[in-house]
Image (cartoon, grey):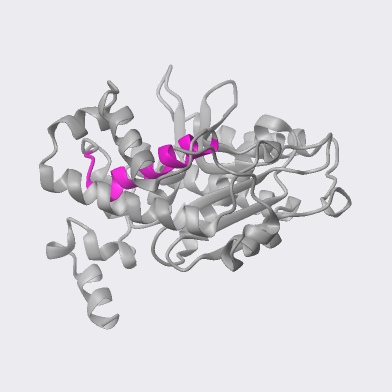
């Protein structure tokens, strides 16, 4: 198989050029943040969180991921019902891991890229792994595996069609883990970005954090990326310059520039989530039923009049 050729701007299709237009910027156009912004954000978050963390049992910390935070701000009845359930893999959940692994492999693939080959390599890597996804892949049915391969191949092919080849100079990283510990380790914020590009230059922002999505826009997608921006600011002391959700099905970006105001609003959302968590878990507050698109696949739907009414009205 032939070596991949160097890609020039003339070789890119309109969708790929649109990605460059959205994400590219000159050094002078990138914002420079105050040198104390990281410490300022950290102090604000720790000061507001400390009173609620006192409710935690001894030797226990509070771990918040984007999923946990989104659940707490959503339907609390659903959150409490699912909180102690054991996590189960399914095709629609595993697809993201397979696609992201294929993207990661494509960054350093020295041969011509065949989407089916990289998807199969991703499946094989995970199947050989000792983690929970590997265990699920080893025991899933042939139908589930075929569906997973088909859906992963569709999403990864769309990525290759719509994105220019990721050059090493852009410092691309797939499945980038983000973590920040606050209040002497009693509060942990954690996330994993689908794709990051760039790096800060002193206090000049340079990193772009990207989430790859199938399907349509949802407001929670915006909040997820803002949460990642907050963690990145806490760990690096410099915010990212841009957040972007990319919708593979429509080849569309939903970008947002990072500002101090955006970070402080995210601090407020995290604190609100901590307060709700404390009230639900440690003060036995009655959970609130909040309807939304999640009602369609909620296991409590048969006994939930709020969700049933929402779905009836949304027809």
The foreground one among 315 and 125 is: 125
Q: Is residue 283 visible?
A: no
Asked if 131 appears above or below 118 in the picture, the reply is above
- Does the magenta stretch mainly form a helix, a strand or a loop? helix
Q: Position of residue 190 (x, y in %)?
A: 50, 34
Residue located at (11% from left, 43% from top): 142
Asked if 58 appears above or below 307 in the picture, the reply is above
Q: Position of residue 266 (x, y in %)?
A: 61, 50
**Quick one: which residue is furthest to the top in this view?**
59
Let me know if residue 75 is in the magenta part: no
Q: Quadrant of the N terminus?
A: top left
> Which residues are drawn in magenta?
88-107
Side (left or right) of 234 relative to 63: right
The foreground one among 183 and 89 is: 89
Residue located at (59% from left, 56% from top): 244
Residue located at (85% from left, 46% from top): 32
Side (left or right) of 161 relative to 8: left
């Amino acid at each position: 198989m032939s070596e991949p050729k160097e890609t020039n701007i003339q070789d890119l299709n309109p969708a790929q050029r649109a990605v460059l237009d959205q994400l590219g910027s000159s050094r002078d156009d990138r914002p420079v943040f105050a040198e104390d912004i990281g410490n300022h954000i950290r102090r604000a978050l720790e000061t507001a969180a400390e009173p609620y963390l006192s409710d935690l049992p001894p030797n226990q910390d509070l771990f918040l991921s984007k999923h946990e935070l989104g659940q707490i701000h959503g339907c609390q009845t659903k959150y409490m019902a699912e909180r102690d359930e054991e996590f189960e893999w399914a095709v629609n959940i595993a697809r993201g891991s397979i696609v992201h692994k294929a993207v990661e492999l494509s960054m350093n693939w020295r041969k011509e890229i065949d989407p089916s080959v990289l998807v199969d390599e991703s499946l094989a890597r995970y199947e050989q792994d000792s983690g929970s996804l590997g265990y699920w892949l080893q025991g899933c049915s042939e139908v589930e595996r075929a569906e997973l391969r088909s859906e992963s191949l569709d999403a990864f092919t769309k990525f290759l069609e719509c994105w220019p080849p990721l050059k090493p100079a852009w410092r691309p990283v797939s499945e980038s883990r983000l973590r920040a510990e606050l209040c002497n380790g009693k509060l942990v914020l954690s996330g994993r970005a689908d794709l990051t590009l760039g790096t800060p230059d002193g206090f000049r922002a340079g990193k772009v954090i990207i989430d790859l999505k199938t399907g349509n826009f949802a407001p929670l997608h915006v909040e997820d990326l803002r949460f990642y921006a907050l963690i990145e600011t806490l760990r690096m002391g410099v915010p990212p310059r841009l957040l972007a959700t990319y919708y593979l099905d429509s080849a569309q970006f939903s970008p947002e520039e990072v500002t101090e105001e955006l970070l402080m609003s995210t601090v407020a959302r995290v604190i609100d989530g901590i307060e709700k968590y404390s009230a639900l878990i440690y003060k036995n507050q009655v959970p609130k039923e909040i309807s939304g698109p999640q009602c369609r696949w909620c296991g409590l739907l048969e006994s939930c009049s709020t969700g049933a009414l929402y779905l009836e009205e949304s027809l």
